[in-house]
């Protein structure tokens, strides 16, 4: 039935948008890439790309149509859209299209000189481009079919050795370079498991042969290294299936030169369905959607965002006054995508949602009545301000932090230090200590695990490498584990980055204290991390930053001072993203602890703004929460419209989220009027207050409470299971609590009408009154002569088993 | 078999929203674009979706030789040298110090701790040339539960979840059961709806007084009262169901339906009652972990569960491998040999495929701590029953058990063959988020030599 309505509406929608024709669009901006052309030595070249941005936001590749004229045409030789050096000099390229003009400076140097071939700069990229050094081919740890290359080229010297010295004479033929096995295999002229990788005419082949011809030299010790890679255009909005856009990729080197590496970069799309890219760097639009196009060259991966719209789509954003920057930025993205957001939810829905999200409980009947009766237009904002000051709010976040910090008893951490650690955490979060202070105090801590309980951080995990991985994952949202053994395949992290970051944690000393349960964590002042390839001692270097000055200091202090500061842009953004995820069920970057180039934020502007605001507010966590909750974006309904039906990542509607294990148990306890007893806590304590990750109950485990064994955000499991259904239907939680609470007896003793009691249960469980149709349904349970108590038990039981109860919506 | 209801109502299968709506949290590795099949569902999209479904490679099911599977998983990476592929003539540093026993297959030896299993070797098919490239536990485990290499872009479903999708529940029992619980994240439903995830027992059948939780109605609630409750619940759910759509919601509905059928069927519940087995049978299996788990597995497949996964022990023996084997293997040996005999005796072996596997084997040479390290290049998997040839040694490793010598077989071929026994063509495609058709197994071949 529902589906049929959707169909009809879909037909109407299509008809309307089909009838309107595209008109009155003009070119708003002309973009020419790259912004400057620098050609040096005879082999250099530059592929130019011209992109027109139209007034309706659509972009087109107009390179072929644009007029390109060079003031001094003698400087370069043009082949299609690629410029080659001809004569030294400087000039300007004038690019014209539809009345718009862009000037691009052009410089040509050493046009006649030939640059010597370099193994690292010219040959290594061939192995990456042709896929030779991937994990499934020769990049495997033991190589493939007897030949090994380092994975994604993390060890060029080793690769040079294996090519030229291993099985001497087999792979390279200096006498007849083109007959070298490495060449013949790549061309597929001899049997090769990987088949033909490139053609004899290709530049890849010519460069490889040229390198062998000159004697397979390795590079001198000091050669320029790649310092950055850019992909152009940075953004595109393609109008309909089949539209194309050429990209151009430029690498910059430590000697200040740059190079067009479009032909050498490896291209990937994270969503081929919407936009695919071929080897030559031509993006082709597919189905409506969004894709991230990536180019990998050397250790760099860069990406740009592509939006594909149905051809000729008409759209206007509904007039809505944004509440704050959250709405402005979310709406901006929705406008780009031509998505209309859902409306604002009712007071009843808002009330339940905000209670579950902020305090992990349901509103009581009194709170429900009071809020609905309040005529104040700003009552939602007032309620938010009120709830963030409740202690339950703090407890929710202490629980989250306890997951990230893995607070639990282990072989190394006894109950007492664990509890002290938890109390320290509660204290910090409760006082709204600025996040940078708290993290610096945590990571730089020295002392006994009793007296300075945050030192337990170094007891929960004692392995140097693991500690550094955890720090990166929790406080920066980055998984650097890959780089332990090879350069990260989908991110910028190299093995050097990994080991120089772990060097911050190589001098953590531990010794026993008087009490056998206590350990003293201190700065031992000695101990280094060596790179597994070559055994170099790695100097501590900030992840994505500079080498640190650590002489005479505790390395952890230096690291923490950088980590939790504006110098590290990931810190504030990561935390804001985690907070966001709590309220929307999905992060702006998702998963929240997998920040990498190839996993871009769904709304980059929003996460950057969060980072700025959070830093500027001196890391005021409560303010951040208020900004999010007061936005329209948070207060939308879950009901979708035609245009946001399929969207899951751009916050155009609210999302159904199952309530987290601890909060769910607390809610059941609350509505049944019962009390729980957990080990180490007084009777009546709530599940959210359990300090120890190793303490659990059947209910909590079944509903996916984190065991806190790892820092991964995947520890908390939200998926429904058969065991959950069985437990709610038959288990002791619902049935026993219903009896133990005695609410039905109490209400009946007060001589309340059964249907009035039903309404109370509805308000307590679902924060709404039953609909007239529902009341009708229940009437037969309470006809004269029936057992009202049984009927009420059945309704109460059903409410606690209902999907509406189990989900926050 | 192929007449079984395959479509499970209330799941994503009959919900077109699923194909637009990726369940974000579970498919964490996917990135932004793939997740947001942005846009309105207009008619063209609808046709495209139907078209995409029509484009899925599908095959008719064919008569299955295996109606059920018992998958015994030995976590940690069991050494092939000390178990099913000893090398008595290799130098001592390769063969290790353990002795061998003669099996019922003439001329073939097992490790000395597998005495009873050697006696049922004529029913087994020992694959000695298993190979893959993943030497890390989680990656190897992924291979041996899904038949795929781990991918950063997609979480693959386990064989149990695929079987759940292909065949619905039988006799009101869950299709896929894990004893005692889901052993690792790869045993789950991956990119498929969580409606196909396993049922975890929640407690260990080896424990005294073992009972699966929450199978029976609470005291004071009889069948008619439960029916009333179900009706009231349906009435309460109605309002929400009309308003909301989500993958998790549909999965929750499915699980409630499953729970109802399980609760209302005494026969189904009885399948979990290990106490109903006569004492001599329990003793024959052994009262320890391995015995109880395997006996319960037999009860479950006998009653209708399609795939039972159970784990036993810890086999990551980097040190003191002899002691490790002597501690754990005898219990496995007793239980496993009894399971095979028992299945044969009850006629179930014909239609029940038993698979013993591990994430990888162990290094050819004994290391400095008298153990062996990870070695995925060659290791052994044991199959039996359900259309698998008995008394067969398939493939071989070289003289030091370091590489496959003959008939190397990867996870793709192994799983394709097992699916074949189940009447499923593994080349068939399933729909992953973002309208991505993915084969059940990519590029595997049925190894006919394994089949009876």
Image (spheres, rainbow, N blue to C red):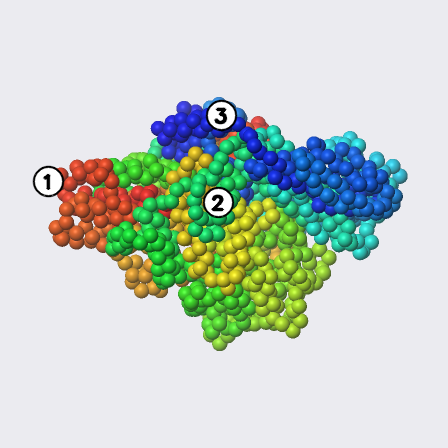
SS at mark 3 in the image: helix
Provide the residue designation for mark 3: A19
Query: At which x and y percent is residue B251?
Result: 39, 38
What's the chain of the residue with tag 3? Answer: A
Provide the residue designation for mark 1: A785
- Mark 1 on the same chain as mark 3: yes
Q: In this rendering, would A770 be left or right of A91?
A: left
Quarter occupied by the N terminus of chain B: top left
Residue A117 vs B320, above or below: the answer is above
Instruction: Decide which of tag 1 and tag 2 comes sooner along the chain.
Output: 2
Which dot marks residue A331? 2
Q: What is the C-alpha distance between the residues marked 1 and 2?
A: 58 Å
- Mark 2 on the same chain as mark 3: yes
Q: What is the C-alpha distance between the residues marked 2 and 3?
A: 26 Å
CB under 8 Å between callouts 2 and 3? no
Q: In this rendering, would A599 be left or right of A769?
A: right
Residue A135 vs A407, above or below: the answer is above
User: At 40% across and 61% down in the image, what residue appears?
Assistant: A394
What's the chain of the residue with tag 1? Answer: A
What's the chain of the residue with tag 2? Answer: A
Query: At which x and y percent is residue A88?
Result: 85, 45
User: At 65% across and 57% down in the image, what residue appears?
Assistant: A497
Instruction: Decide which of tag 1 and tag 3 comes sooner along the chain.
Output: 3
Nearest to the observer: residue A125 or residue B306: A125
Q: What is the C-alpha distance between the residues marked 1 and 3?
A: 64 Å
Circle nearer the viewer, 1 or 3: 3
- Mark 1 on the same chain as mark 2: yes
């Amino acid at each position: 039935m529902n589906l049929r309505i959707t169909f009809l509406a879909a037909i109407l929608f299509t008809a309307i948008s089909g009838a309107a024709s595209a008109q009155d669009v003009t070119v708003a901006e002309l973009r020419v890439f790259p912004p400057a052309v620098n050609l040096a030595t005879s082999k250099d070249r530059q592929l130019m790309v011209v992109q027109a941005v139209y007034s309706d936001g659509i972009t087109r590749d107009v390179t072929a149509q644009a007029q390109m004229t060079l003031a001094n045409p003698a400087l370069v030789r043009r082949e299609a859209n690629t410029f080659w050096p001809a004569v030294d000099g400087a000039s300007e390229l004038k690019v014209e299209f539809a009345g718009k003009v862009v000037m691009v400076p052009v410089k040509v140097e050493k046009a006649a000189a030939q640059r010597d071939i370099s193994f690292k700069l010219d040959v290594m990229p061939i192995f990456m481009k042709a896929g030779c050094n991937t994990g499934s081919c020769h990049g495997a740890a033991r190589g493939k079919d007897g030949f090994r290359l380092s994975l994604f080229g993390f060890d060029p010297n080793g690769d040079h050795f294996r090519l030229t010295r291993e099985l001497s004479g087999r792979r390279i033929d200096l006498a007849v370079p083109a007959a070298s096995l490495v060449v013949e295999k790549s061309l597929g002229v001899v049997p090769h498991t990987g088949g033909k990788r490139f053609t004899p005419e290709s530049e890849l082949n010519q460069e490889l042969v040229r390198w062998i011809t000159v004697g397979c030299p390795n590079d001198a010790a000091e050669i320029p290294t790649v310092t950055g890679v850019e992909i152009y255009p940075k953004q595109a909005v393609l109008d309909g299936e089949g539209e194309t856009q050429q990209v151009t990729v430029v690498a910059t080197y430590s000697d200040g030169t740059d190079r067009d590496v479009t032909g050498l970069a490896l291209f990937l799309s994270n969503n081929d369905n919407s936009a695919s890219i071929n080897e030559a760097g031509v993006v082709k639009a597919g189905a409506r959607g969004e894709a991230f196009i990536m180019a990998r060259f050397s250790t760099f991966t860069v990406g740009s965002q592509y939006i594909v719209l149905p051809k000729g789509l008409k759209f206007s954003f509904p007039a809505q006054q944004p509440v704050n920057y959250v709405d402005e930025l979310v709406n901006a993205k929705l406008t780009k995508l031509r998505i209309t957001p859902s409306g604002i939810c009712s007071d009843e829905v808002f009330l339940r949602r905000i209670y579950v999200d902020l305090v992990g409980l349901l509103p009581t009947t009194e709170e429900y009545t009071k809020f609905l009766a309040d005529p104040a237009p700003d009552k939602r904002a007032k309620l938010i301000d009120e709830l963030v000051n409740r202690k339950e709010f703090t407890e929710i976040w202490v629980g989250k932090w306890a997951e990230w910090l893995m607070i639990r008893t282990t072989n190394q951490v006894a109950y007492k230090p664990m509890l002290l650690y938890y109390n320290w955490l509660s204290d910090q979060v409760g006082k709204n200590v600025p996040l940078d202070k708290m993290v610096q105090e945590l990571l730089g801590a020295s002392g006994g695990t009793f007296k300075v309980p945050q030192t337990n951080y170094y007891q929960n995990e004692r392995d140097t490498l693991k500690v550094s991985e955890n720090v990166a994952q929790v406080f920066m949202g980055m998984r650097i584990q890959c780089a332990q053994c090879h350069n990260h395949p989908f991110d910028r992290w190299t093995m050097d980055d990994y080991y120089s970051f772990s060097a911050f944690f190589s001098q953590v000393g531990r010794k026993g204290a008087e009490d056998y349960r206590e350990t003293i964590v201190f700065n031992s002042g000695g101990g280094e991390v060596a790179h597994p390839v070559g055994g170099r001692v790695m100097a501590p270097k900030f992840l994505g930053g500079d080498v640190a000055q650590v002489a005479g200091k505790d390395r952890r202090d230096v690291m923490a001072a950088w980590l939790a500061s504006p110098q590290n842009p990931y810190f504030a953004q990561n935390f804001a993203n985690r907070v966001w995820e709590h309220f929307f069920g999905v992060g702006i970057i998702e998963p929240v602890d997998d920040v990498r180039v190839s996993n871009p934020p769904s709304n980059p502007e929003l996460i950057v703004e969060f980072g700025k605001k959070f830093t500027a507010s001196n890391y005021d966590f409560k303010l951040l929460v208020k900004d999010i909750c007061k936005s329209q974006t948070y207060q939308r309904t879950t009901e979708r419209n035609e245009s946001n039906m399929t969207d899951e990542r751009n916050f155009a509607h609210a999302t159904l989220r199952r309530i987290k294990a601890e909060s769910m148990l607390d809610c059941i306890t609350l509505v049944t009027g019962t009390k729980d007893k957990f080990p180490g806590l007084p009777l009546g304590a709530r599940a959210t207050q359990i300090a120890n990750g190793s303490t659990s109950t059947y209910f909590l485990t079944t509903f996916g409470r984190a065991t806190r064994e790892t820092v991964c955000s995947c520890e908390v499991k939200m998926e429904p299971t058969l065991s959950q259904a069985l437990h709610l239907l038959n288990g002791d939680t619902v049935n026993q609590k219903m009896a133990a609470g005695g609410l039905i007896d109490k209400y009946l003793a007060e001589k309340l009408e059964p249907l009035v009691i039903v309404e109370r249960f509805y308000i307590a469980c679902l924060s709404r009154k039953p609909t007239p149709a529902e009341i009708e349904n229940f009437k037969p349970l309470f006809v004269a002569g029936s057992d009202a108590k049984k009927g009420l038990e059945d309704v109460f039981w059903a409410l606690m088993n209902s999907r509406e109860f189990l989900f926050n919506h | 078999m192929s007449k079984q209801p395959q479509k499970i109502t209330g799941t994503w299968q009959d919900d077109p929203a699923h194909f637009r709506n990726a369940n974000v949290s579970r498919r964490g590795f996917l990135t932004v674009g793939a997740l947001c099949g942005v846009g309105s569902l207009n008619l063209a999209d609808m046709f495209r979706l139907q078209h995409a479904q029509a484009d899925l490679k599908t095959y008719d099911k064919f008569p299955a030789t295996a109606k059920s599977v018992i998958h015994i998983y030995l976590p940690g990476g069991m050494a092939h040298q000390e178990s099913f592929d000893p090398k008595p003539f290799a130098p001592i540093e390769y063969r290790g110090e353990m002795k061998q026993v003669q099996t019922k297959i003439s001329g073939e030896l097992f490790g000395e701790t597998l005495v009873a299993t050697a006696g049922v070797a004529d029913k087994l098919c020992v694959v000695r040339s298993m190979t893959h490239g993943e030497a890390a536990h989680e990656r190897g485990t992924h291979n041996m539960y899904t038949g795929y290499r781990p991918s950063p872009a997609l979480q693959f479903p386990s064989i149990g979840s695929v079987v759940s999708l292909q065949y619905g529940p039988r006799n009101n029992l869950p299709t896929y059961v894990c004893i005692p619980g889901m052993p690792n994240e790869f045993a789950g439903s991956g990119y498929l709806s969580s409606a196909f995830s396993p049922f975890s027992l929640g407690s260990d059948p080896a424990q005294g007084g073992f009972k699966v939780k929450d199978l029976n109605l609470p005291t004071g609630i009889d069948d008619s009262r439960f029916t009333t409750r179900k009706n009231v619940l349906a009435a309460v759910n109605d309002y929400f169901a009309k308003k909301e759509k989500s993958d998790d919601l549909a999965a929750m509905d499915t699980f409630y339906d499953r729970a109802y059928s399980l609760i209302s069927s005494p026969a189904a519940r009885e399948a979990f009652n290990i106490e109903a087995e006569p004492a001599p049978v329990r003793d024959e299996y052994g009262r320890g972990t391995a015995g109880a788990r395997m006996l319960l597995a037999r009860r479950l497949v006998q009653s209708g569960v399609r795939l039972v996964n159970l784990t036993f022990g810890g086999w990551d023996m980097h040190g003191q491998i002899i002691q490790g084997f002597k501690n754990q293997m005898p219990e496995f040996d007793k239980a496993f040999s009894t399971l095979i005999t028992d299945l044969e005796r009850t006629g179930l072996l014909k239609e029940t495929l038993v698979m013993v596997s591990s994430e990888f084997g162990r290094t050819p040479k004994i290391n400095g701590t008298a153990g062996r390290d990870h070695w995925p290049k060659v290791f052994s998997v044991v199959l039996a029953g359900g259309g698998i040839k008995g008394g067969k040694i398939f493939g071989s490793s070289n003289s030091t058990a370091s590489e496959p010598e003959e008939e190397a077989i990867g996870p793709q071929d192994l799983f394709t063959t097992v699916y074949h026994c189940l009447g499923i063509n593994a080349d068939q495609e399933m729909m992953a988020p973002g309208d991505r058709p993915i084969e059940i197994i990519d590029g595997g071949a049925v190894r006919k030599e394994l089949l009876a």
